[in-house]
Image (spheres, coloured by chain):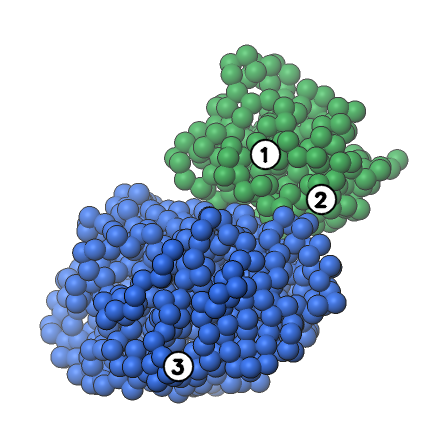
Chain colours: A green, B blue
Amino acid sequence: MRAAVVVFPGSNCDRDLAVAFQREGFAVDMVWHKETALPDGVDIVGVPGGFSYGDYLRCGAIAAQSPICQAVLAHTGRGGYALGVCNGFQVLTETGILPGALLRNAGLKYICKTVGLRVETTDSAFTGGYAKGQEIAIPIAHHDGNYFADEATLETLRGDDRIAFTYTDNPNGSVGDIAGILSDNRRVLGMMPHPERAADPGHGGTDGAAFFRALGGLLAPA
Amino acid sequence: MQDPEITPELIESHGLKPDEYERILEIIGREPSFTELGIFSAMWNEHCSYKSSKKWLRTLPTDGPQVICGPGENAGIVDIGDGQAVVFKMESHNHPSYIEPYQGAATGVGGILRDVFTMGARPIAAMNSLSFGEVDHPRTKRLVHGVVEGIGGYGNCFGVPTVGGEVRFHPAYNGNCLVNAFAAGLADADKIFYSAASGVGMPVVYLGAKTGRDGVGGATMASAEFDDTIEEKRPTVQVGDPFTEKRLMEATLELMQTGAVISIQDMGAAGLTCSAVEMGDKGKLGVRLDLEKVPCREEGMTAYEMMLSESQERMLMVLRPEKEAEARAVFDKWDLDFAIVGETIAEDRFLIMHHNEAKADLPLSKLSSEAPEYDRPWVETPAADPLGDVPQIDPIDGLRALICSPNYAAKQWVYEQYDTMVMADTARTPGLGAGIVRVHDSGKLLAFTSDVTPRYVKANPVEGGKQAVAEAYRNLTAVGATPLATTDNLNFGNPEKPEIMGQFVGAIKGIGAACSALNMPIVSGNVSLYNETDGQGILPTPTIGAVGLIASEADVIGTTVREGHVALLVGETSGHLGQSALLAEVFNREDGDAPRVDLEAEKRNGDFIRANRALITACTDLSDGGLALAAFELAEGSGVGVHLDSGATDVLFGEDQGRYLIACNFDQAEALMIEAGKAGVPISSVGRFTGDSVRFDGVDAPLAELSALYRSSFEQTLG
């Protein structure tokens, strides 16, 4: 099992995501943003949290134009798995790999705290370790996590069971309380909360561990 | 552009006193050029030269077997075993934050992070200690919002978890808020980088962001009192770019791996001037700079502007010349400037060339060695008047008053704006007591706290100084940590006033005594004087930042109490209400003496907690608000009620020092009583954690109601 974690100059959760992958047995390659291709044999690419290129413009907008994102696009275009957490979710929406956009939080403030999420679907490599409707506690840390999509897109997301997580107590104004969504082939997940920050007992919460365990289980060679 | 003529007005506007100017004339034997005047003003202001404080700072204890490097470098370095070291410091950004709260606070965080990674340490934790004016002062809300957003905006993007801090409000800060930023980093003890240059003819390299006109004269501004013209000083505040800082950190740490660095120094206050002089002075070398090689953001910058710019995210290093290509490649990778701007020279000379014209030519070592040093007159702070009568009050009303005050209400409105968990090693986020981060992959943990009780320091500088250290010691102890060392951020008013100087001297004496007794040497620090507006000084605020070590996760003492737990009080209670939080918040009085700090008792009680941590399920120290507030905070955090036996005002709200509140089961309590007896530590059962109400000797209120007040009052007042 190989995971690649993209490293933008302003990524700051790259190591955290790599550690979470490694804990479940993945070999992890850190991939610099100036690279034009992912290493051979990568099963899943992780786009981590942080501030890609400073995000002084719209979060993730510049990152979406980066060389490595063209490689990520090619990878997901071939049906490869991808995970975008926080800034990574913003980048995946900016590249168009996932629909919708992340706006400023409704309260216009950065929020970092542990929030409740509801698992809306277990039909994915990411969420298969949870029960449908299960409530889990996962930290958020963002200024621009207010998910927005037009009504038609939301209809599609709902109709195709592509909403992965919702907030139990919406912290940022996201439409439909949406915290994370899946791509139409269910192989790309973008989410604002950080499962890698609740993945070992030292974190004070382990509700994110099942997320990486499910991925590891599914992608493990038969 | 023609340089202006040197006139008495120009000298005064550079913050130089007439006798200081005379000294300059003596040193160089001629009239200084405009650029030279700027350089002297940058080196000799209070902020850079510590000219009023040096004499007293020398009295502080700075040694210990754990200390690798004490004050004098960018940050202090302390051994944490296994070949690892923690590198930390606290520094103020008070004046800039009052003028421009967002950028002032942001660049304060940036500056302290740079101090840490300049030494080769990756920052792993940050804290901040904030003091604002009274809540309904017209400026306060804007300052709180700006400062908190600025700290978050910088630290969150840079990617360091903010794990602790303080926020206080008092009218004495109406005209001068305090923003003290702390950062700690992790380094290998044998891979630490210092600022002393060595070798003649070695290239001096400029790294990082480009130089602009921002912050010109900032350090001089920060060394003066404010008056009603402060709006005009906004351009002296620098603008921060945390994304560049993040890249600069990564590039610097990567550069250090290449072996290219002889010495390195960040450009902080007084930018290029201070960093170049520091490296030359420590290496007993001269430095020549060719300013046309300095990467500039703006065209037509003069030598004066370049030498005094405080543009952020810049470093200066002395390079091992054979490694130039490798070093340059690292900075190319991170898209940062790398420019050779000068060289080290054998003579004692600071030579500034700009387009082949000597703009400054000064004896380098004299810029720091001959800097003025003052033995300022001081008077001892008179003993406080005895405490007047304090009426008994309904204890629940007293508690309500405290938790509704923004001083003691829950601060989640503040710390939820900071990323407290990035790096995924935070073991204790802010809220109650010290913050804790894991030392990645080592099994060890580090605990961090920042403390001071300014109203104590005002009433009794010596005891107040001791108390700041003692409270830090207790906060570290309460989570199971062994205190290692301390950084001090000494914020005071105008040192030219003997009463203010007396506060400073008293506080230093108290801090020194406590640091010695508790084995927490001062390894770094910062002095901020002239915190006055229109002649009104702040409360003396010597903030203590302290770091403790915990050997393993099993040694961490928790904060979770359970139904039925016994409430045990460790330490002696006499019911000292002088200068207490209750007195200030309920009676609007600030009288009486500060509580006395018995350093022997502090040590004994702290050692007792550490020695018996296996018997302690949850623990917190007692400080502002005494037993009542500590018991409430511990209960509230776990959603379990608390019943205390006493309803007496002095027992519940007195602020005697050296005390801890413990929650544990009955068997543990019994065992602790026995151990305490053996150790000669006062311990008593004061009640029980149970039910869903807070009850003090029969008077009670629902926990849920008090919790809602506690959690909402800060935001309601300041949000």
Q: Quadrant location of residue B290?
A: bottom right
Tell me the quarter of the image containing the N terminus of chain A: top right
Which residue does the numbered mark 1 point to in the structure image? A62
Q: What element carries label 2?
A: strand
Q: How dense is the environment of label 1, judged by Cα within 10 Å: few (below 14), some, or many (20 and up)?
A: some
Of residues B87 and A137, the one nearer the viewer is B87
Q: For this view, does B223 lie left or right of residue B634?
A: left
Q: Residue at 24% across / 55% down in the picture?
A: B230
- To which chain does the residue with label 2 belong? A
Which residue does the numbered mark 3 point to in the structure image? B28
- The reply to whether dot 1 and dot 2 touch (C-beta < 8 Å) is no
Which residue does the numbered mark 2 point to in the structure image? A32
Of the image marks 1 and 2, the number of the one nearer the N terminus: 2
What percent of the width, then of the height, locates residue B655?
A: 28, 71
Q: Is mark 1 on a helix, strand or loop?
A: loop
Q: How far apart are marks 1 and 2 (CA)?
A: 15 Å
Q: Is mark 3 on a helix, strand or loop?
A: helix
Q: For this view, does A209 lie left or right of residue B488?
A: right
Q: Nearer the viewer, mark 3 or mark 2?
A: 3
- To which chain does the residue with label 3 belong? B
